[in-house]
Amino acid sequence: MFSIQVTDVNDNYPKFTQDSYNKTIYDDSPVNMVITRVFATDLDEGLNGLLRYRLSSLQTDEIISTFSINETSGEVYLKESLITRSKEYYRVIVEASDSAKQPLIAQSLVFVRVFDHHNNFPEININLLSNKPHAEISEHASQGATVAHLAVSDPDTGDNGLVTCMLTAGMFRLQKFDTNEYKVVVFTSLDRETEPRYNVTVVCQDTGNPPKTTNKTFIVVVLDENDNEPQFNPVTYQTRLLENNKIGVSLLQVSAADLDLDQNAKIEYTLQEGGNSKFSIDNETGKYL
């Protein structure tokens, strides 16, 4: 009588009980929390059937730094806090390997969805395009001229991180040119003499429940252009003088005003060429001599 012992050959791949695992966690979940447990089997014996779990190296550094797995139990852990992350989904590749000299490997996927537990307020950053504490725009600026740049961010995920913005000032509009980035542009004609400055408020709101809103106000100064003619008041002047008046005696003083600013509003008085040469006028004061 004799016996035959059949030696196991490593001819069976490990097999996960699920092709994929779907789990949901909150962004404030504690570090080292068990997210899920994966499980695989191997029909071989001994070392050929002894399984070890690991994260696949064929994935991003972000996955490797955020998650870990217990090599014997298959428990998947949260390795780093997600509070400051804005990502809503993670795709984690896990592997089961037998312990043979030439191991066989199987893979499965763990899909982790992150719910935002702390709904943050949107953050607004405004570039005024000047070295001053206010934005500036010419009163002759055409419709669509850029006044400032605006960027809004929200560290939340899902609806809590979706943000829309609007302006309160009717003379300006927001023009979106990139994700969460806008230009503040001129919407209608400006006139410094009518309104020399505007307080512009940006209102940004996320779509969370309840929604969170952030307001930020900046000033737009309308720059003067020389678009107003000087005006005499009154338009006509009359005076009486004695025939023996001395030269240089002031007969009257005219006055004009200009609605513009600074040099554009500086008045200089002169007499029309070809007039009576017996009279003169002070260029600065308007005194008629």
Image (spheres, rainbow, N blue to C red):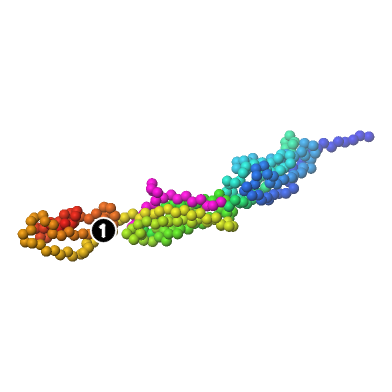
**Front residue of this view, candidates 89 and 265:** 265
Please indicate, yes or no, whether residue 186 appears anywhere in the rendered image.
Answer: yes
Residue 83: image location, x then y, percent = 60, 46
Q: Quadrant of the C terminus?
A: bottom left
- Which residue is identified by label 1? 258
Q: Given the image, on which type of amino acid does mark 1 rest? A: Asp
Outermost right residue: 1
Label 1 Cα crowd, 10 Å radius (few <14 / some 14-19 / many 20+): some
Tell me if 207 is positioned left or right of 38 in this view: left
Outermost left residue: 244
Residue 138: image location, x then y, percent = 34, 55
Determine if the magenta segment contains residue 82: no
Please indicate, yes or no, whether residue 104 appears anywhere in the rendered image.
Answer: no
At x 69% / y 41%, what residue is drawn?
69
* Range of magenta residues: 120-140
Q: Quadrant of the N terminus?
A: top right
Determine if the magenta segment contains residue 136: yes
**Front residue of this view, candidates 270 and 54:** 270
> How many numbered circles does the render carry?
1
Label 1 residue SS = loop
Tell me if 38 is positioned left or right of 187 in this view: right
Residue 120: image location, x then y, percent = 56, 51
At x 55% / y 55%, what residue is drawn?
212
Tell me if 115 is positioned left or right of 184 in this view: right
Residue 28: image location, x then y, percent = 62, 47
At x 74% / y 45%, what residue is drawn?
39
Tell me if 99 is positioned left or right of 25 in this view: right
**Front residue of this view, candidates 143 and 248:** 248
**Where is 41 relative to 265, above or below?**
above
At x 29% / y 55%, what residue is drawn?
261
